[in-house]
Image (cartoon, rainbow, N blue to C red):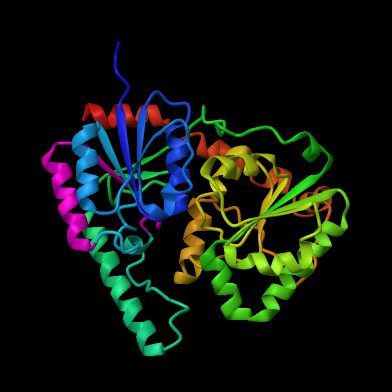
């Protein structure tokens, strides 16, 4: 019997990178190992991977030596230093250690080679408020990005959308057998309601509050109150724990409102699968891939903090992630339809993103990619 390829995924602090890996390994004949930093490990409950934890490079090296993986994935090699998990020098040392052991190394790239293909683009940060400090940080990030592009210029890149580039060796994948393993059917009581799922990251919450002050919280609660005024609706809101007191004031007695200060990976998949519609604040989040796979309606109340890093980055992602289909972006300050069928029909959400699956599904399967890597 041929043994399953052993794949080791080493994660930065990014939740979206776990989504990419989950889509790659689910229902595939791999033995998948996830090495997770503390920020992610506390949310891990995945049963189809072997979970490991790490705090520094010595832990990572130990896991590599113990597992002896067939392939190592850095998720993402471009984020470890930005997330301040590994310094650039330590990251290079890790890459050299892996290369010396002769293990194929792959990295993901959250920017889809944007900074390399747009050499004139610069980082544009919203904080800190001090202009000189902000400019210095933007300059440092630009230099770090150039360093990382050079460091991984000879490392094959893995993309979870149909993105092709000649800049580096690259693979795009689509897992036709994924089916979002682990997703459970809605609870019986949920069949009575159309569940609206709202998701906002800590970064996007802070951005909205710093930009709009107390007006954002007021507008957000106004929209949620409106959605819940339709007796057919329920709301699940996933976001930072800091939002809890605000929601307690308005929705503590409403059994059709659920607030989760983030949750486990499996529960997140379950909630995504059972919701009727997804409302997001970040068009660049990899978690949206779940809704592309599920072919479910989703729209946005902001482009999100990542898209604001550069004026051209938003268009880059529209072209490659959404294949030219422009996301629907509404304003939290304006009322919108509170019936799922009405808002779906208004923006043609039922059919809008279906063509994406046709383009995504033309990519290689994870099994084909692993075969190609191991045969080189």
Specify whether residue 341 is painted magenta: no
Tell me which corner region of the image, top left, top right, bottom left or bottom right, holds residue 132.
Answer: bottom left
Residue 244 visible in the displayed image? yes
Specify start and end residues of the magenta stretch as a single range.
87-113
Foreground of the two, 153 or 119: 153
Residue 246 lies, with reference to residue 338, above or below; the image says below
- For this view, does 71 lie left or right of residue 49? left
Q: Residue at x 48, y 34 (%)?
A: 362
* Image coordinates for residue 46, horizontal then vertical, percent: 48, 36
Foreground of the two, 296 or 165: 296
Q: Residue at x 80, y 52 (%)?
A: 255
Tell me which corner region of the image, top left, top right, bottom left or bottom right, holds residue 115.
Answer: bottom left
Specify whether residue 104 is painted magenta: yes
Q: Residue at x 27, y 32 (%)?
A: 373
* Image coordinates for residue 114, horizontal then vertical, percent: 38, 60
* Image coordinates for residue 171, horizontal then vertical, percent: 35, 40
- For this view, does 40 lie left or right of residue 251? left
Residue 161 visible in the displayed image? no
Foreground of the two, 274 or 157: 274
* Image coordinates for residue 151, horizontal then vertical, percent: 21, 56
Q: Quadrant of the N terminus?
A: top left
Q: Quadrant of the C terminus?
A: top left
The single residue placed furthest to the top in the displayed view is 1
């Amino acid at each position: 019997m041929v043994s399953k390829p052993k794949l080791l995924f080493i994660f930065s602090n990014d939740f979206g990178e776990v989504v990419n890996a989950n889509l790659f390994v689910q229902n595939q004949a791999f033995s998948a190992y996830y090495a997770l930093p503390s920020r992610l490990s506390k949310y891990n409950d995945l049963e189809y991977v072997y979970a490991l934890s790490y705090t520094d490079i010595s832990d990572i090296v130990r896991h590599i030596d113990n597992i002896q993986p067939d392939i190592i994935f850095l998720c993402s090699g471009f984020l470890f230093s930005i997330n301040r998990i590994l310094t650039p020098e330590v990251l290079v040392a890790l890459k050299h250690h892996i290369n010396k052991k002769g293990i194929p190394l792959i990295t993901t790239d959250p920017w889809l080679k944007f900074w390399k293909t747009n050499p004139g683009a610069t980082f544009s940060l919203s904080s800190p408020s001090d202009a000189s400090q902000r400019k210095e940080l933007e300059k440092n990030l630009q230099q770090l990005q150039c360093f990382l592009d050079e460091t991984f210029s000879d490392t094959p890149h893995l993309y979870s959308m149909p993105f092709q580039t000649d800049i580096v060796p690259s693979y795009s994948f689509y897992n036709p057998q994924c089916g979002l393993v682990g997703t459970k059917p809605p609870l019986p009581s949920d069949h009575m309601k159309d569940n609206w799922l709202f998701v906002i990251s800590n970064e996007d919450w802070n951005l909205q509050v710093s930009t709009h002050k107390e007006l954002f919280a007021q507008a957000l609660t106004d929209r949620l109150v409106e959605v819940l005024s339709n007796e057919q609706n329920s709301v699940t809101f996933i976001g930072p724990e800091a939002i809890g007191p605000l929601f307690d004031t308005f929705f503590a007695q409403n059994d059709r409102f659920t607030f989760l200060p983030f949750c486990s990976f499996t529960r997140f998949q379950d909630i995504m699968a059972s919701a009727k519609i997804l409302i997001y604040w970040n068009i660049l989040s990899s978690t949206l891939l779940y809704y592309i796979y599920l072919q479910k309606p989703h729209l946005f109340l902001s482009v999100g903090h990542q898209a604001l890093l550069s004026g051209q980055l938003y268009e880059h992602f529209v072209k490659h992630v959404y294949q030219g289909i422009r996301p629907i972006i509404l304003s939290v300050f304006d009322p919108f339809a509170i019936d799922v069928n009405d808002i779906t029909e208004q923006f043609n959400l039922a059919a809008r993103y279906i063509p994406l699956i046709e383009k995504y599904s033309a990519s290689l399967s994870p099994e084909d990619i692993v075969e190609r890597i191991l045969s080189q």
